């Protein structure tokens, strides 16, 4: 059922974007779709046992309205049995433990230092930018033919003891 949900979400996200990702009348469609993707990424990763306790923490550094969209739609939801908690971060290497860290394009230059600082943590790093995978992210958003897609760097996830499901791999635009 989860696999079917991810496939449907991917198809709907592709169709919902249409020709662009601008903000419409106080609605940031791009942020809404990215929030949905991040939530589904979180559900498509097998986390180490010690990370399946307490709240499921998603931290956001940059990303415009993404933090607001995550809070609005997912703050009351769960990943497994864990309640989701959304945190907004400023540009810092002092990132407290989190399951998912989103790094917006305005902080992409800072990504290598963040990846190094979190190298021993089971944190799924999601970013924006064409070279984010080379800078340490496991997943990155890309715009292709006006549609939001994602790319996956399996080794960046596995080095953090995160197992990516085959469904997520199959939905990625590119897997390295």
Image: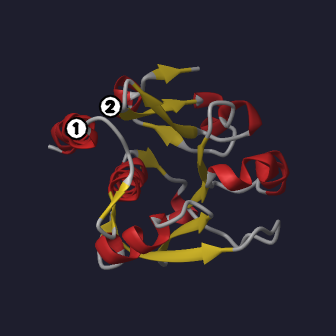
Numbered badge on residue 65:
none
- Residue drawn at x 37%, y 49% as measured from the top left: 37
* Quadrant assignment for the C terminus: top right
Residue 22 on image: x %, y %: 39, 51
**Is residue 148 shown above or below 29?**
above
Determine which residue is flagged by label 1: 3
**Between disc 2 and disc 1, whose residue precedes?**
1
Determine which residue is flagged by label 2: 167
- Residue drawn at x 34%, y 28% as measured from the top left: 171
Residue 141 on image: x %, y %: 50, 39
Residue 97 on image: x %, y %: 67, 70
Q: Which of 31 and 93 is in front in this view?
A: 31
Q: Residues within 10 Å of mark 1 (few under 14, many from 20)?
A: few
Whether the residues at callouts 2 and 1 have beta carbons within 8 Å, the answer is: yes
* Quadrant assignment for the N terminus: top left
User: Quadrant of residue 13 in the image?
Assistant: top left
Report the Cα–Cα distance between label 2 and label 1: 6 Å
**Is residue 97 shown above or below 149?**
below
């Amino acid at each position: 059922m989860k696999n079917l949900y991810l496939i449907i979400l991917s198809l709907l996200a592709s169709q919902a974007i249409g020709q662009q990702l601008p903000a419409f009348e106080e609605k940031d469609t791009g942020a809404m779709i990215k929030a949905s993707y991040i939530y589904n990424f979180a559900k498509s990763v097998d986390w180490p046992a010690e990370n399946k306790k307490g709240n499921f923490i998603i931290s956001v550094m940059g990303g415009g309205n993404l933090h607001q969209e995550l809070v609005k739609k997912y703050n009351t939801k769960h990943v497994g049995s864990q309640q989701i908690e959304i945190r907004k971060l400023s540009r810092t290497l002092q990132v407290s433990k989190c399951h998912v860290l989103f790094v917006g394009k305005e902080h992409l230059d800072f990504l290598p230092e963040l990846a190094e600082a979190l190298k021993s943590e089971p944190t799924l790093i999601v970013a924006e930018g064409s070279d984010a995978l080379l800078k340490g992210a496991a997943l990155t958003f890309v715009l292709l033919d006006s549609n939001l897609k994602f790319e996956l760097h399996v080794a960046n996830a596995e080095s953090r003891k995160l197992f990516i499901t085959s469904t997520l791999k199959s939905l990625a635009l590119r897997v390295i």
